[in-house]
Image (spheres, helix red, strand yellow):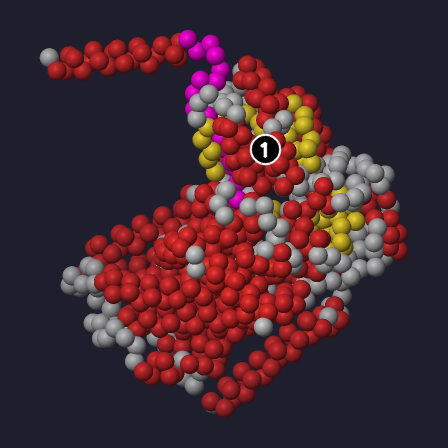
């Protein structure tokens, strides 16, 4: 008797459980898994947690959002995981520079353009800076000096925007330089402070304090619009070198998710970027607001990926 | 008197009940993070980072920093008892710490390490308090040329580390150098020996190798010798003699502590060098200065005390560039820097003047934290010593489990876990045939640093070695190196 009751209870429960599944006309209706392809505390992690807290505050997502740090292999692990969720609209992930560079370096089955693009929200741009004691005060002086004597310019990594930007610049402005790659920000900044390097390209957030104290001097900003904290620093475009290269901070979903889900997220992101919390995040982290949706984002990724591959093949970093 | 008013301000911040509570939470967590092999302070801080979102930055930084220096205390416990370093900076502590435990002196070894850690840590905080601006000058003068020379100085310590058959020692070091070449070549961006795997882009991490070589290698060796069969207790440890160190332990190591603390602090101040290099350098320094170098590796108290004072002083030293320039000198301080940014602070030279309650609150809390850690360690030692009385049938699986979880938890990588097991086998054979796992590990840590900094230097100088003679700081380091080498040779001659 008891077994029979249990069985019928299970049947009833089963029918009840399957009912919403059958009437699944409305997306979203389930828990969302948000992959962060890096560890806690990094730029990618902070952006993701900011977006989630905004979505919770304004009740934009009806169910729970669960952030998961799936770090490893410069993003290969996390994005590889999302790639494996082909067609599943309950997975999403945030992008950063490695989203472009990791597939160029390693044999991943995906590239930046394989995923379903949702939105580019901001770009991570850099400052070109010199030692505070340097005679160079402006970008023009830097270029003139560089033409006379090739400078040593430092940055993080080689397959990275910090190499690509000076490379493109040197080609446009007509100077030669030696690129010195570093592993970590601390080592790069100390090398510039010690006078070993002539210039360096770096993320502004991590050197802001040294810029404000005058130990380092910024001479150009590589993004579209200079963040407030950097004052009236000219952008490269204003100086006549519009490179159009930035590291994408955006959102993508697994390949082949239904159009309906993609549209839902695009609409949701349009609301997120209008909130004061988002504006505060952009300002605090010294990012450049740079918004593109859906296929426009894919086109941006395509273009950036192409430029990167070209330059890196020429320099011999990738095959 | 500026320093004292700042320190008083700091104390008034640190001593509020809420900050004290966070400080104690931090030191406890730090101990735990330190004890688990592989799972280091950087990972420990990173995991707690999301909860500090929206917290008062001062309370948060007091807690997270306590995890950092607390882990330096905890990391040694498993080094001494199980030959398994809890932290990369505790590798040097296995060399003499574990033999001491085998001789039945686990209690004194643990007490001495706690005392040495306390002295090193506190000494470091005193130097921060008095001389931060001065030491930030050291940081500022360190470019790739100086860094390369420092790494060379570190590699000189290989000579002291290799004993017994020098050919085997050199082969061990060469294996370490070879492993260090794997991963992305920083200069050209090309991948080396990654076999097309994305996971290998970052190269071989030193943590799974160290845990495998020392921890599992030792365990396999015990099985091989059949020591696990003899009786219920662990026979490799002699019967515990006494808990407290003898008077001569303190007397013999009084200068060791001072040397370790000074060396450790200086190395810690330099970004990229850190506690691991400091502890290894201190070990070889003590060995080369010792009147009885043959006792090193066989349970010399100075061989444990020096590295312990050094790694704790280095973790204090790493706070100098972080607070005075906003530069992270190690993996753990890089996570702390990310935290500063997350809390909306601007790390840099102005931080200490613009947010004195934050910087000085942290510094003051470090005095209290070190005291708390000393007390915590001494009280917990009897508990840890109980561990070595466990029968091998319980201890051995536990060690394997801890090593596995510890390695996996670092990056969540199965590849690294398998690497750790493979390194265990290699460690066993190295021990069996008299090779030097210590030389392998040192070469694996320093090799890539030497390669990178030399290539950076030569790119900057466009191929000229003259750059080493042009910079005052690099001349200084070369001078010190020459003094060390000459002194070493003279000492050696005198002994002959």
Magenta region, main secondary structure: loop
Q: Is residue A291 above or below residue A195?
A: above
Q: Residue at x 33, y 69 (%)?
A: B110
A228 vs B300, left or right, is right
Tally the numbered discs: 1
Q: Is residue A40 magenta?
A: yes
Q: Position of residue B490 (x, y in %)?
A: 54, 87
Identity of the residue drawn at 26% across and 55% down: B396
Give me the residue at 46% from left, 35% from top.
A68
- In this rendered view, identify the residue nearer to me: B424 or A307: A307
In the picture of the structure, the residue carrying the numbered disc 1 is A277
Q: Nearer the viewer, residue B252 or A271?
A: A271
Q: Which residues are magenta?
A: A23-41
- Comparing B46 with B133, the one in front is B133
Residue A113 part of the magenta segment: no
Note whether residue B461 is visible. yes
Q: Position of residue A63 (x, y in %)?
A: 44, 23
């Amino acid at each position: 008797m008891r077994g029979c009751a249990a069985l019928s209870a299970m049947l009833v429960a089963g029918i009840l459980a399957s009912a919403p599944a059958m009437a699944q006309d409305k997306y979203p209706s389930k828990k969302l898994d948000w992959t962060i392809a890096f560890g806690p505390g990094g730029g990618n992690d902070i952006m993701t947690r900011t977006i989630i807290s905004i979505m919770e505050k304004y009740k934009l997502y009806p169910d729970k959002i669960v952030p998961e740090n799936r770090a490893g292999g410069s993003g290969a692990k996390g994005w590889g995981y999302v790639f494996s969720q082909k067609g599943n609209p309950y997975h999403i992930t945030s992008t950063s520079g490695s989203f472009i560079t990791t597939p160029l370096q390693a044999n991943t089955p995906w590239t930046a353009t394989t995923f379903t693009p949702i939105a580019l929200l901001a770009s991570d741009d850099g400052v070109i800076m010199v030692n505070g004691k340097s005679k160079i005060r402006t970008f023009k002086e830097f270029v003139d000096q560089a033409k006379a004597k090739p400078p040593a310019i430092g940055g993080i990594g080689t397959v990275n925007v910090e190499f690509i930007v000076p490379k493109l610049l040197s080609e446009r402005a007509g100077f030669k330089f030696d690129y010195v790659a570093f592993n970590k920000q601390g080592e790069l900044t100390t090398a510039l402070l010690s006078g070993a390097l002539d210039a360096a390209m770096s993320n502004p957030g991590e050197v802001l304090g040294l810029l404000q104290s005058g130990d380092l001097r910024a001479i150009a900003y590589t993004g579209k619009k200079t963040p407030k904290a950097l004052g009236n620093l000219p952008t490269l475009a204003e100086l006549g070198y519009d490179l159009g290269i930035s590291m994408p901070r955006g959102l993508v979903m697994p390949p082949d998710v239904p159009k309906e889900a993609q549209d839902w997220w695009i609409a949701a992101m349009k609301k997120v970027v209008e909130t004061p919390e988002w504006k505060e995040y952009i300002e605090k982290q010294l990012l450049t607001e740079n918004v593109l949706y859906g296929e426009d984002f894919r086109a941006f990724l395509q273009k950036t990926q192409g430029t990167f591959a070209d330059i890196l093949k020429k320099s011999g970093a990738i095959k | 008197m500026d320093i004292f008013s700042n320190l008083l301000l700091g104390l008034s911040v640190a001593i509020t009940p809420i900050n004290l509570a966070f400080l104690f939470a931090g030191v406890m967590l730090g101990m735990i993070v330190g004890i688990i092999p592989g799972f280091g302070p950087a990972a420990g801080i990173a995991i707690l980072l999301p909860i500090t979102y929206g917290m008062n930055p001062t309370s948060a930084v007091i807690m997270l920093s306590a995890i950092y220096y607390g882990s330096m205390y905890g990391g040694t416990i498993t080094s001494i008892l199980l030959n398994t370093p809890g932290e990369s900076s505790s590798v040097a502590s296995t060399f003499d710490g574990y033999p001491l435990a085998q001789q039945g002196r686990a209690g004194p070894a643990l007490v001495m390490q706690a005392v040495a850690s306390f002295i090193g840590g506190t000494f470091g905080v005193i130097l921060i308090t008095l001389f931060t601006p001065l030491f930030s000058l050291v940081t500022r003068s360190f470019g790739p040329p100086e860094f390369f020379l420092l790494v060379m100085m570190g590699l000189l310590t290989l000579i002291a580390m290799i004993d017994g058959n020098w050919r085997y020692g050199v082969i061990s070091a060469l294996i370490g150098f070879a492993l260090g070449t794997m991963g992305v070549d920083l200069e050209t961006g090309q991948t080396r020996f990654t076999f097309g795997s994305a996971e290998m882009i970052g190269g071989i991490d030193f943590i799974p190798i160290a845990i495998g070589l020392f921890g599992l290698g030792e365990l396999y060796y015990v099985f091989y010798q059949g020591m696990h069969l003899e009786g219920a207790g662990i026979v490799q440890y002699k019967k515990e003699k006494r808990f407290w160190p003898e008077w001569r332990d303190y007397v013999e190591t009084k200068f060791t502590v001072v040397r370790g603390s000074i060396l450790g602090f200086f190395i810690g101040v330099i970004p990229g060098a850190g506690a691991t290099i400091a502890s290894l350098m201190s070990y070889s320094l003590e060995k080369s200065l010792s009147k009885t170098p043959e006792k090193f590796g066989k349970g010399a108290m100075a061989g444990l005390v020096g590295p312990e004072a050094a790694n704790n002083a280095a973790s204090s030293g790493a706070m100098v560039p972080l607070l005075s320039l906003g530069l992270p000198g190690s993996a753990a301080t890089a996570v702390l820097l990310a935290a500063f940014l997350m809390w909306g602070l601007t790390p840099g030279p102005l931080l200490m003047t613009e947010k004195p309650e934050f910087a000085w609150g942290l510094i003051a809390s470090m005095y209290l934290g070190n005291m708390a850690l000393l007390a915590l360690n001494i009280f917990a030692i009897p508990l840890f010593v109980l561990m070595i009385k466990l029968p091998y049938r319980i201890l051995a699986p536990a060690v394997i489990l801890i090593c596995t979880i510890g390695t996996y938890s670092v990056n969540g990588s199965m590849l690294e876990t398998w690497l750790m097991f493979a390194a265990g086998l290699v460690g066993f054979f190295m021990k069996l045939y008299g090779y030097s796992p210590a030389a392998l590990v040192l070469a694996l840590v320093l090799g890539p640093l030497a390669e990178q900094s030399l290539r950076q230097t030569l790119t900057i100088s466009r191929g000229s070695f003259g750059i080493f003679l042009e910079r005052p700081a690099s001349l200084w380091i070369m001078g010190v190196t020459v003094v060390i080498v000459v002194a070493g040779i003279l000492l050696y001659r005198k002994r002959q």
